Amino acid sequence: MTHPTRRDLLLGAAAGALAPALPGAALARSREDTLRYVVGTVWNGLDPAGFGNSREAIGLSANVYDRLVRFGRKPEGGAFTFDFDTIEPELCESFSRSEDGLTLTFRLRPDATWHDGSPVTAQDIKWSLDRAVSAETMARAQLATGSLTDPAQFEVTDARTVTVRLPRADRLALPNLATVHAPMFNARLARAHATEADPWATEWLQANTAAGGAYRVERRSADGQQVVLSRFGDWRSGPPPALENVIVQTVPEASTRALLVERGDADLCLDLMPADITRFEREGAPRVISAAIPSGFTALCFNTGLPPFDDARVRRAVALALPYAQIFAQAGEGRGEPLYGAAAPSGGAFPQPMPFDTDMGAAAALLAEAGFADGFETELSYGVSKATWADPAAALIQEALSSLGITLRIRKLPDAQMAEVITAKSAPLLLERSLALFPSTEYFFRIFLAGDQRWNFSSWRNPEVEALLPEARFEPDAEAYEAIATRLVELVAEEVPMAPLWRPVQDIALAEGLEGYTTNYFYKADFRQLSRG
Amino acid sequence: MGPAARLLAGLALRLATALPAVFCLLALTFVLMRLLPGDPVSLMASNPGGDAAERAALAARLGLDAPLAEQFGGWLAALARGDLGRSVVTGQPVAADLAARLPASLELTLCGFGLALAAALPCGLWAARHPGSAGDHALRLLGACGAALPGFVSGLMLVLVFYHGLGWAPDPTGRFDLFAGPPPRVTGFALIDTLLAGDTAAFRDAAARLVLPSLTLALFVFAPLMRVTRGALLAVFASDYMLNARALGLTRRQRLLTWGLGNAAVPVLMVSATLFGALLGASVLVETVFTWPGVGRYAVEALQAGDYAAVQGFVLLMAGLFVLITLVADLAALALDARMLPA
């Protein structure tokens, strides 16, 4: 149940009392100080890591909650992008890592306060970290990827110091603490709403905040389509935000969003149709930034657990039969970077261009060698939400494979059904687009190319990969890590669990004069460093 | 039995027969939702792990691990307490979600329907008086065009012309001016709440925001309404009693007002009730184009995400509304034509 909080009632009463006296004006805000951000999906909960919360909700929470640390940023193409290799203090004043990499020590700011004015204490931090690894939220599984699993790892050493102990020197422990999955809560406030059945106040925190970040949630509409954020004046964790208010509004129709941005009624939009983006670029307005997504990929994934794709020769044959250039031009609108056509894999970054390119002769020969000279029948699945690019890509793949005698049925599935098919690993071929939270080769392989979890679209269980991954994860030496990563990439080129097509970009349309846009690791808007020039 | 008693008995029977129908509909929806491919748990478990243990825990949390009959029983028991469950998409109780969205849908549908009626009735009357004329054909063509254009196409075209091109209409993003904020919620109807708040500027704004979506809806139902009005009036004009009235020397106006309109109103009313009910749930595309926070879009989003509780709540609401609307239409028809009293 949602009960109106005391604050809601007070605000409502204030609005009711003021409205007759000052019609409209009382609650009206200045357009100049306000950012209007339009999005396609609803935000559906305030807990940064609540189960089932949309990516929009998660992105929004990053502006409302602080973390102990954050990623730095570096300039890129007229804007900024996050720097995975630089971690800065956020809610803490400073932090250090012990020589052996097993202990992280965080020293808190003396002047930091929560939105309700109470000071940030080491106890709050301990409670927040305990909650992240204990409560039923998405944070638990995410933090486990950085060896953060047990409340006993977090210790309050004095009133302003918290230490985190790691069982092994995990490369991803600190990056995990910089993500939305490790938000810092006003523990006293949250605890007051915990119940015996819900000791971590997960219910209450979905509808309320106990935060101390740069913005506070001033108002949200009952239907989840509008959120008004206002700047928190006492925020000390970074340079004060320039924009006083942010209005986040759900506008489900992409062409309506484009019209709003075009007319200057909306200031920022991250999810427009490629056709609108190319039009904006052609006309020179509104401004468009194309941000690279280093850990992103679009790929044709083979189910290596199902015949005929359990045979690497068949996978390679299909990978050599794809009309890459055409797919990239038509399905990808030529936006992003090709992930095909390399001479050989180079270095340990991944995704990177793979040594696959269209070569029908070689494809036919491989197929014959595998005993499929006359081809076979199979089907290709993808989710409806990916149709914009997957429809043309699937049609091109279907046509190309038919010349090898492969009959491809195309199955476009509703997203809930697609999720079921992926979880059951029952589809022989998938068209997928995704991104890893961290641009780290070992992490990418751990999520997408190993293990039995949902995201291993190819169901690829290569023994060498599975043996190398733990080594890489705990390898302190950068050179040795790079050597393992290079080997991992080579294995993909040899075994072809997927045929990467291209790396997508994120197209951001923003109002003239809006400066300081930073692409963050969660690829949603961060309002804190935006300003009107 | 006197007419009043017969009327009451008829009403009671009507409600009694509606109940099993609603129950069957609910049971069918319940089973269908779970039989349809698609698994909300898989969709929700988007962790790096996303493993079987996590999915099992999620299924238990959503109450999806019990046998189907038990789930349905549990849902009915909760329903008896007025609890429709919680939506996984919005994270809110379904009853609250629907209550928040229904006024928006009702207001839009009422305005659109009112607009359509205001245009279709006189046009239908004129066409019936001049059947086969050039005007009759022109009206038919206009109606066909309106009905043939899907709502989102005509809606987008209206937006392009009046918002983007001419700049006359406010931005198509919902019911209130974003910067002024919504008025205190009393009824949930934008026009009424702004008036109650004494805010005429907000009232004008809310009304302006209603124009384009209402027009889009009106375009869609104008044709069937006009056609049925025209047809009903033609049948009445050709009837024996009208011939009799004419033989008695009554003027055309007298004939129309005394016998014509009342008799022709019954089929128009019946069609209106069905159309209104259908519009309420089916204006999804119009709601999408104009960012209208209505129940139709809520249901479609819920369906896509496999949000069982939300879809069931929506079906229940729609079934209830249909029962209510047909009941009201029957009563109105009765007032117009006493022969329709149940025997």
Image (tube, rainbow, N blue to C red):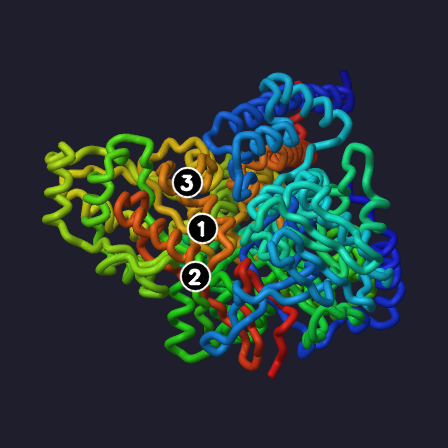
**Residue B182 position in % (x across, y down):** 74, 61
**Residue A423 position in % (x across, y down):** 45, 34
Q: Do the residues bearing badges 2 and 1 touch, measured as CB atoms within 8 Å?
A: no
- The crowding category of the residue bearing disc 2, from other C-alpha atoms within 10 Å (few below 14, some 14 to 19, many at least 20), is many
Q: Foreground: B181 or A434?
A: A434
Residue placed at 59% from the left, 18% from the top? Answer: B67
Disc 3 is placed on an element classified as helix
**Residue A363 position in % (x across, y down):** 15, 46
Badge 3 and badge 2 both on one subunit: yes
Tell me which numbered mark, 3 or 2, is placed earlier along the sequence: 2
According to the picture, the residue beneath numbered tag 1 turns out to be A442
Instruction: Please state the chain letter of the residue tagged with numbered disc 1 in the rendered image.
Output: A
- The crowding category of the residue bearing disc 3, from other C-alpha atoms within 10 Å (few below 14, some 14 to 19, many at least 20), is few
Q: Do the residues bearing badges 3 and 2 touch, measured as CB atoms within 8 Å?
A: no
What's under tag 2, amino acid-wise?
Pro
According to the picture, the residue beneath numbered tag 2 turns out to be A294
According to the picture, the residue beneath numbered tag 3 turns out to be A467
Tell me which numbered mark, 1 or 3, is placed earlier along the sequence: 1
As measured in the structure, the alpha-carbon distance from the residue carrying label 1 to the one carrying label 3 is 12 Å
* Rendering quarter of residue B211: bottom right
Residue placed at 68% from the left, 36% from the top? Answer: B86
